[in-house]
Amino acid sequence: MIVKITERLHRIIDLYFGIFSASIILSLWLITFIWFCSVDISKMPLFIIIIILLFRVFLHTGVFIVAHDAAHGVVLPQHHKLNHVIGYLAIYIYALLPYKQFVEKHWMHHRYPASSNDPDYHDGHNKNVVYWYIKFMRGYLDWKQNLVLLVWMSVIFHGIRLGLHVPGINLIMFWVLPLLLSSMQMFYFGTYLPHREPKEGYTNIHHANSNNFSVFWSLLTSYHFGYHWEHHEYPDLPWFKLPSARNAAD
């Protein structure tokens, strides 16, 4: 009896932990955004501002991870439409990106990893991390989308600043900078390090490697996205199950 109850509980957790974790991340993002927009930065010590900024970067990265897992259908796997509604919301919160295009390009990355057809990969010539990052960003934002993003972010920025009397410096520190820094964070730990070509060449079909970070540092740096071979090998696993896959691979 106890075994059956335990098994049923595990099944329920497997089914709903994705939506639970997504709800926590999105709620924390919204709550901290409202809270930190109301603080007086001029009265805060610099190290507290830095801690808050880094926490906001971590949450902003988490919002991207929610959208990413929704693209894989694992936020709420038993409710396909609601799963993608959550993904649409998350990627819009993250950077006002079109969800359908994001999903299409992300699956191209899985089908053609580290190749000329991979929108996340470098251009074949400039393997430098800076050039690669620029190419990576262009893969998801063409000039029209950059223009739309710039216009809408300006409208939202000034709408909140003037309409709700939020200091511009708060919006820059706790919204604009977290967006920029989280894009760099996810690129570096989730694309550049896993997919850069080793000296001996790629050794698996995913053209991907995994970092050796502990679970704690893996979570802080990229919500375990650095366990990247495991992500490509088991694309139906949500972010919080990647450490188990990593341990099994070892």
Image (cartoon, grey):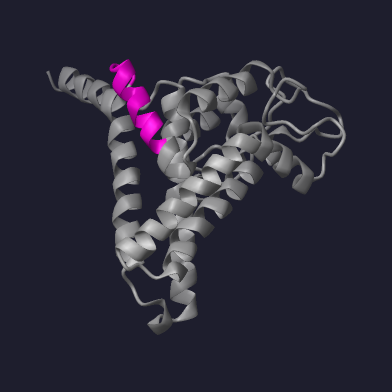
Q: Is residue 186 left or right of residue 50?
A: right
Image quadrant where residue 116 sits: top right
The magenta stretch spans which residues?
77-90
Q: Indicate yes or no whether the magenta region holds residue 87.
A: yes
**Depth check, front residue: 141 or 184:** 141
Q: Residue 68 appears at what percent x and percent y?
A: 48, 31
Image quadrant where residue 241 sits: top left
Q: Is residue 63 left or right of residue 79?
A: right
Q: Quadrant of the N terminus?
A: top left
Prevailing SS of the magenta stretch: helix
- Residue lying furthest left in this view? 1
Q: Is residue 89 above or below residue 105?
A: below
Q: Is residue 53 left or right of residue 2?
A: right
**Depth check, front residue: 179 or 74:** 179
Residue for point 23% across, 24% down: 12
Q: Indicate yes or no whether the magenta region holds residue 250.
A: no
Q: Is residue 153 above or below residue 225?
A: below
Q: Residue 55 appears at what percent x and percent y?
A: 44, 59
Q: Residue 212 appears at what percent x and percent y?
A: 63, 42
Residue for point 31% across, 69% down: 38
Q: How many marks?
A: 0
Q: Residue 235 appears at what percent x and percent y?
A: 51, 21
**Depth check, front residue: 1 or 181:** 181
Q: Quadrant of the C terminus?
A: top right
Can see residue 212?
no
Can see residue 166?
yes
